[in-house]
Image (cartoon, grey):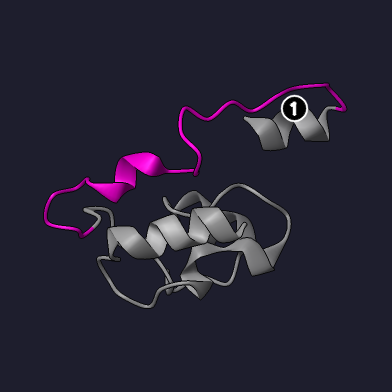
Amino acid sequence: MAFFLHQAGRDFIVLERNEEPGSYFREMPRHRKLISINKRHTGRSHAEYNLRHDWHSLISNNASLLFTRYSTEFFPQADAFRRYLAGV
């Protein structure tokens, strides 16, 4: 949502309950693997199509911010997602 508000030139504040983004993933999921697959290779070259099928990446026009650059695992580790959120 912040991406779209920024694109629209609106003022906004993003609030986080804890001191780090994605703190839910410190303990969840219990088995430590995300259940959504890391769509590094969708078989398509269209950037918008690939982003629509990438459930981990934050919405951005900056390709260096894609989660697929943080993990190559088909079912990524929750800790990789936490590192991604903290690094962006």
In percent of width and height, residue 44 lies at 50, 70
**Left or right, 59 with reference to 68:** right
Residue 45: tell me if it is visible: yes
Q: How many marks?
A: 1
Residue 38: tell me if it is visible: no
Above or below, 14 against 60 in this view is above
Residues 9 and 19: in front is: 19
Q: Quarter of the image containing the C terminus?
A: bottom right
What residue range appears in magenta? 9-33
**Left or right, 29 with reference to 67:** left
Report the residue marked by disc 1.
5
Given the current orientation, which residue lies at the most extreme front position? 19
Q: Main secondary structure of the magenta part?
A: loop
In percent of width and height, residue 25 lies at 31, 47
| Quarter assignment of residue 13 | top right
Given the current orientation, which residue lies at the most extreme bottom position? 72
| Quarter assignment of residue 65 | bottom right
* Residue 27 drawn in magenta: yes
Given the current orientation, which residue lies at the most extreme right position? 9
**Left or right, 24 with reference to 33:** right
Count neighbours of disc 1 (C-alpha within 10 A) and say few if under 14, some if 14 to 19, many if 20 or more: few
* Residue 34 drawn in magenta: no
Q: What secondary structure is found at the residue carrying circle 1?
A: helix
- Residue at position x 27%, y 53% in the image: 36
Residues 39 and 11: in front is: 11
Kindly identify the amino acid type of the residue bearing the numbered disc 1: Leu
Residues 12 and 26: in front is: 26
In percent of width and height, residue 5 lies at 75, 27
- Residue at position x 56%, y 49% in the image: 58
